[in-house]
């Protein structure tokens, strides 16, 4: 069967598994060309199947020689389709790690379910030498189920409604969009989903089960961004959730220091095209222009370059202590926020219109990056070659 991309708005309806494999191999090739990371060897990644979590896993395994446990919420093949890109990323990531003699265990299910925590803890005790020395929190989702119900996050403002434009990847149009003001309940719900609660729940459960190694570290990915995106991001509902995450980092840092001599940090990343970020309203013209400017200045990074730089230079630098800012945060958004990049964005942003956005931003790079997440538009893949559906449905994560 030939598989061609199906988009609805900014959601990918299918994926191309051999393309996912090829894209993963490209990221693995990049990592294997870098100097080794001298860091964690037993790593738990929550949200391991795509974006920053996947890039972290590839970096730590293939450059750091780490055994990894990945938790993710992904869909396998069923009567409706072949399953999600993350499903195949888990499978192929495990293959790549096992080729290096490493463990890459996958748990598929809801990371917010206490039952998932128990399963992972049992596995750590029985099959993973009893300890982890790094826990990465990289979940991006719109909802969190609890025993009594469900929290639903929203991407809205907290100050006043916002008018802007968003890229529609399906129609390739820049469309006007109004972002509504969130209610207090919506701010709370978003914080419940994307804040630090569940990060803390995981660390508490792992600590109580005594599976955190001495000097164990934990990090959670975050975004801050420039003034230009503040209304929707930093000061929006998602930003409120991230503030909660940052406070949680400080609290967990104290807790881990006293309990195991460990540390907890928020890690502030650069804006990138991921399954999650294309969803944020009125953010996409900024990201597409950011791609253009950072590529011109040869500062552009994807998740894999970000992750490698984080581990090799910030969290596990060979020549000194962990590199933190004055708020004890890891910062790999430094290049995005550099004056050279932001001044260039400021001087060009107002020239973007619905008619010219394909040439005044890196729309092509933005869309290609999105397609690649689902295995399409990957260099070297022959999309005229039929996919062996039968063989693909046999693969297990
Ligand atoms: P992504 O959509 O690529 O990855 C999200 C991961 O979470 C996937 O592995 C998915 O399976 C997993 N997941 C979602 N719900 C789950 C659940 N209930 N149980 C288990 N796993 C679940 O997203 P991305 O962009 O990598 O986001 C990860 C983190 O990085 C988020 O905290 C995000 O805010 C942050 N970040 C993202 C930036 C961006 O530009 N994409 C920039 C800075 C930070
Ligand atoms: Na992730």
Image (cartoon, rainbow, N blue to C red):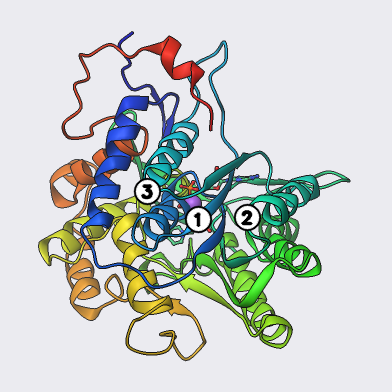
Give the mark nearer the N terminus: 3 vs 1: 1
Identify which residue is drawn at 41% across, 77% down: 316
Residue at 45% of width from left, 24% of height from top?
A: 13
Q: Secondary structure at mark 2?
A: loop
Disc on res. 100: 3
Q: CA distance from mark 3 to mark 2?
A: 17 Å
Image position, residue 143 (x, y; %): 67, 45
The picture places residue 34, in percent across and down from the top left corner, at: 23, 63
Q: Mark 1: which secondary structure?
A: strand
Q: Position of residue 168 (x, y in %)?
A: 35, 36
Q: Residue placed at 37% from the left, 26% from the top?
A: 17
Look at the image and tell me whether residue 157 can be seen.
no
Q: Mark 3: is the Cβ under 8 angstroms from ligand 2?
A: no
Confirm or deny contact between disc 3 and disc 2 (CB under 8 A): no
**How far apart, in angstroms, are the residues tagged by discs 3 and 1?**
10 Å
Q: Is residue 172 above or below residue 185?
A: above
Q: Earlier in the sequence, mark 3 or mark 2?
A: 3
Horizontal side of 69 relative to 50 (left or right) equals right
Q: Relative to 288, is 144 on the left or the right?
A: right
Q: Earlier in the sequence, mark 1 or mark 2?
A: 1
Residue 19 seen anywhere in this rendered image of the structure: yes
Q: Is residue 32 above or below residue 297?
A: above
Q: Which residue is mark 1?
A: 67
For the residues labelled 1 and 2, the Cα–Cα distance comes to: 8 Å
Query: Which residue is tagged 2?
Result: 128
Give SS at disc 3. loop
Instruction: Give the tally of numbered discs.
Output: 3
In the image, which disc is placed on residue 322?
A: none
Q: Quadrant of residue 131?
A: bottom right
């Amino acid at each position: 069967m030939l598989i061609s991309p199906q988009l609805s708005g900014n959601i990918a309806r299918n994926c191309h598994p051999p393309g996912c494999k090829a894209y993963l191999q490209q990221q693995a090739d990049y990592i294997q060309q870098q100097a080794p990371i001298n860091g964690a060897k037993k790593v738990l990644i929550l949200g391991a199947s795509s974006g920053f979590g996947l890039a972290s896993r590839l970096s730590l395994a293939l450059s750091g020689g780490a055994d990894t446990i990945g938790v993710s919420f992904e869909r396998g093949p069923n009567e409706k389709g072949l399953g999600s890109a993350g499903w195949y990323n888990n499978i192929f990531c495990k293959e790549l790690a096992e080729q290096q003699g490493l463990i890459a265990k996958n748990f598929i299910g809801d990371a917010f379910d206490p039952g998932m925590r128990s399963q992972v803890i049992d596995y750590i005790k029985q099959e993973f030498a009893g300890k982890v020395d790094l826990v990465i929190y990289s979940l991006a989702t719109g909802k969190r189920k609890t025993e009594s119900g469900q929290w639903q996050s929203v991407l809205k403002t907290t100050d006043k409604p916002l008018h802007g434009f968003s890229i529609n990847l399906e129609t390739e149009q820049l469309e006007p969009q109004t972002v509504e003001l969130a209610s207090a309940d919506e701010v709370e719900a978003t914080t419940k989903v994307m804040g630090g609660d569940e990060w803390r729940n995981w660390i508490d459960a792992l600590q109580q089960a005594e599976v955190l190694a001495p000097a164990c570290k934990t990090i959670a990915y975050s975004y801050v961004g420039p003034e230009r995106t503040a209304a929707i991001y930093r000061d929006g509902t998602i930003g409120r959730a991230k503030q909660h995450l940052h406070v949680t980092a400080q609290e967990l840092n104290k807790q881990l220091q006293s309990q195991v001599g460990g540390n907890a940090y928020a890690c502030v990343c650069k804006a990138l095209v991921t399954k999650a970020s294309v969803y944020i309203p009125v953010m996409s013209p900024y990201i597409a222009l950011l791609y253009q400017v950072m590529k011109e200045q040869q500062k552009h990074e994807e998740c894999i370059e970000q992750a490698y730089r984080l581990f090799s230079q910030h969290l596990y630098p060979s020549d000194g202590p962990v590199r933190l800012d004055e708020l004890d945060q890891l910062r790999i958004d430094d290049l995005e926020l550099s004056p050279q990049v932001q001044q260039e964005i400021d001087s060009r942003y107002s020239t973007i219109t619905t008619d010219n956005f394909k040439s005044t931003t890196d729309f092509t790079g933005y869309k290609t990056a999105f397609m690649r997440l689902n295995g399409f538009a990957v260099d070297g893949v022959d999309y005229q070659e039929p996919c062996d559906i039968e063989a693909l449905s046999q693969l297990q994560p």
